[in-house]
Amino acid sequence: MRNFFSVLFVFIFISCKNDVLPKPKAYLSLTYPAKKYKKITLERPYTFQVLKNTDVIDEPNNWLKIKYPNLKASLDITYRPVNNNIKELLTEAEKLVFKHAVKAEQIIPKDFVNSKKKVFGSMYEITGNAASQLQFHVTDSTKNFIKGSLYFYAKPNYDSILPAVAYIKEDIFQLIESLEWRK
């Protein structure tokens, strides 16, 4: 029996020379093209800048679809004239955001105010496996109202698309900051 404990004792000390270290976290190594913007050339009641390597598709009723072919995503822009119905338009836009609350982990609002250009609005970042991760609306409060929604052409998996969402989020900021209403 004593021989057994000696062997066990030697085995434990010989086998435990190296410390066990956990594997470091792995991060995706995604590279995106450098950002360069251009103004949309379509005749609309508004103008703004979009990323140069996107496809801007003309839609009826002054609507647009901004496609990101490499990311398999699109930013759908809808335009509505304001005819004493700003409250209705804002309520409708917020209803569409909160439709995603079922799948969302969190909805983070960010407000925009540019009194000089008469651009007022909000952007909503929707975390979790919702169908749309970013939505926004902007208005001048009297004549024009724009709503935008980001969609990916894939089943939503928030962890996988998070880098692409962050990339496109910068473009939405640029869109809102460069937005001008035409008279």
Image: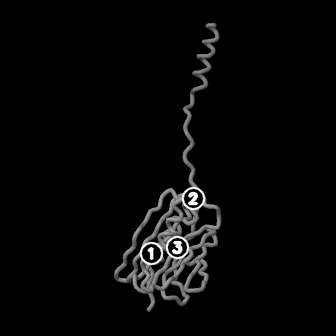
For label 2, count other residues whose C-alpha is less than 10 Å away and answer few (under 14), some (14-19) or many (20+): some
The type of residue carrying mark 3 is Lys
| Whole-number angstrom distance, CA of label 2 to CA of label 1 | 24 Å
Residue under the point 40% across and 77% down? 120
Query: N-terminal of the two: label 2 or label 1?
Result: 1
Q: Quadrant of the C terminus?
A: bottom left
Please report whichever mark, 3 or 2, sits nearer to the chain's N-terminal start: 3
> Seen from this angle, which residue lies furthest top?
1
Circle 1: residue type: Leu
- The single residue placed furthest to the left in the displayed view is 115
In this rendering, the label closer to the viewer, 2 or 1: 1
**Cα distance, mark 1 to mark 3?**
31 Å
Q: Residues within 10 Å of mark 1 (few under 14, many from 20)?
A: some
Q: Is residue 23 above or below residue 120?
A: above
Give the residue at mark 2: 129
How many marks the image carries: the answer is: 3
Residue 45 locus on image (x, y percent)? 49, 88
Residue drawn at x 60%, y 58% as measured from the top left: 157
Q: Secondary structure at mark 2?
A: loop
Quadrant position of the N terminus in the picture: top right
State which mark lies toward you, 1 or 3.
Answer: 1
* 77 displayed left or right of 142: right
**Residue, disc 1:** 90
Q: Secondary structure at mark 1?
A: helix
Task: Say which residue label 3 marks.
Answer: 35
How far apart are the alpha carbons under marks 3 and 2? 27 Å
- Of the pair 167 and 153, the residue shown nearer to us: 153
Q: Locate residue 164, reporting x and y percent.
A: 56, 64
Q: Amino acid at mark 2?
A: Asn
Of the image marks 1 and 3, the number of the one nearer the N terminus: 3
